[in-house]
Image (tube, coloured by chain):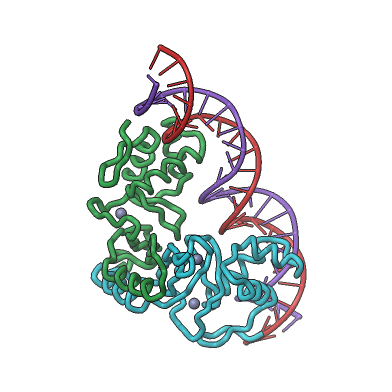
Chain colours: A green, B cyan, C purple, D red
Amino acid sequence: MSAHHENDQPSLTKNQALVLGALTGSNGPLTAYAILDLLRADGFRAPLQVYRALDKLVDFGMVHRLESLNAFVACRHPGCTSHDSAAFAICEQCGLVTEFTPDKALDMLKDWAKGEGFQMAKTTIELRGLCRTCTAH
Amino acid sequence: MSAHHENDQPSLTKNQALVLGALTGSNGPLTAYAILDLLRADGFRAPLQVYRALDKLVDFGMVHRLESLNAFVACRHPGCTSHDSAAFAICEQCGLVTEFTPDKALDMLKDWAKGEGFQMAKTTIELRGLCRTCTAH
DNA sequence: CCTATATAGTAATATTATAACATGATGAGC
DNA sequence: GCTCATCATGTTATAATATTACTATATAGG
Ligand SMILES: [Zn+2]
Ligand SMILES: [Zn+2]
Ligand SMILES: [Zn+2]
Ligand SMILES: [Zn+2]
């Protein structure tokens, strides 16, 4: 199995592929333990199998962790290289999660960081509220 | 004890005051269980005593939860009314947490939300990286 | 007084995440 | 092919974070 290089599609191990499959097959975020339950049929027995795969998938930029939910989503944002700067809108009514790239907001945050002498490595931007559908309703 | 009204300084219960005191006396964020340990001498025995006080203090805008740390900080930002929109820069080297109000970035996020029909109730903005001191060093 | 509401105490439990250690696969260099 | 290093894996136990359920007490308003 070949090593991962930046800008390659990394080749995934069996466990990584299973976890990614569970996430891409879900219509919303999943917790690590929800993934574990989904994959018991595939031989998963312990949380660490999930967490280890998630760590790698997050490294690869293929999965994002939602800090305010302690949950994970497959990246729906292929082609974008700034996986450390994605933003998410989370509907508190229906659970819908929308990923977007807040370029302008990031520029503003970078300005602040520059003025402050803070060297940004990663941003967490999560909006909580109501999606269009739930607002209309 | 008088009820809390918006824009008042709410009167705090004993437990709330103790938890807030622990946070303002700390030079950094504290987890709920760290607060519990600090307050055992004051009679705290169970996590729920801390979590209940924290819930209220967060409601009052006097304490913020840092989602990416599962920890809490006293608001260092008095006079600001947008306690649902504060941002934090977290140094991964020394643990320094700096609160700021990212007005411009928030405007950009509001623009996105408006275009998307998403009704924002709260934002989580947390920057991870190195503070000025740790960068120089 | 009566009742609704808020606060509080306590025990048990649920949820999320990591540590520690053993095993097996893979590939590079010899 | 063998040796070694590295990475992935399996398994058990445990740590860290958070909530449920139930009880009790205070207190303000009618
Ligand atoms: Zn993404
Ligand atoms: Zn919705
Ligand atoms: Zn604040
Ligand atoms: Zn620092």
- Residue A69 placement, left or right of C14: left
* Apparent side of residue B75 relative to residue B52 in the rendered image (left or right): left
Q: Residue at x 57, y 86 (%)?
A: B9
- Compared to residue A26, the image places residue A101 above or below, namely below
The answer to which of B105 and A128 lies nearer the viewer is B105
- Measuring 50% from the left and 61% from the top, which residue is drawn there? B93
Identify which residue, B33 or A22, lies in the foreground.
B33
- Total number of numbered discs in the rendering: 0
Quarter occupied by residue C28: top left
The image quadrant of residue A94 is bottom left
Q: Nearer the viewer, residue A87 or B15?
A: A87
Left or right: residue A120 versus residue C16 is left
Residue occupying the point 29% across, 70% down? A107
- Residue B108 percent coordinates (x, y): 29, 73
Residue B124 coordinates in the image, percent (x, y): 42, 67
**Quadrant assignment for the N terminus of chain B:** bottom right
Q: Give the percent coordinates (x, y) of residue B92.
A: 48, 61
Task: Give the image location of residue A90, x and y in percent.
Answer: 37, 62
Q: Quadrant of residue D2?
A: top left
The residue that appears at 30% across and 40% down in the rendered structure is A10
Name above or below for residue D18 compared with residue A21: below
Q: Is residue A39 above or below residue A75?
A: above
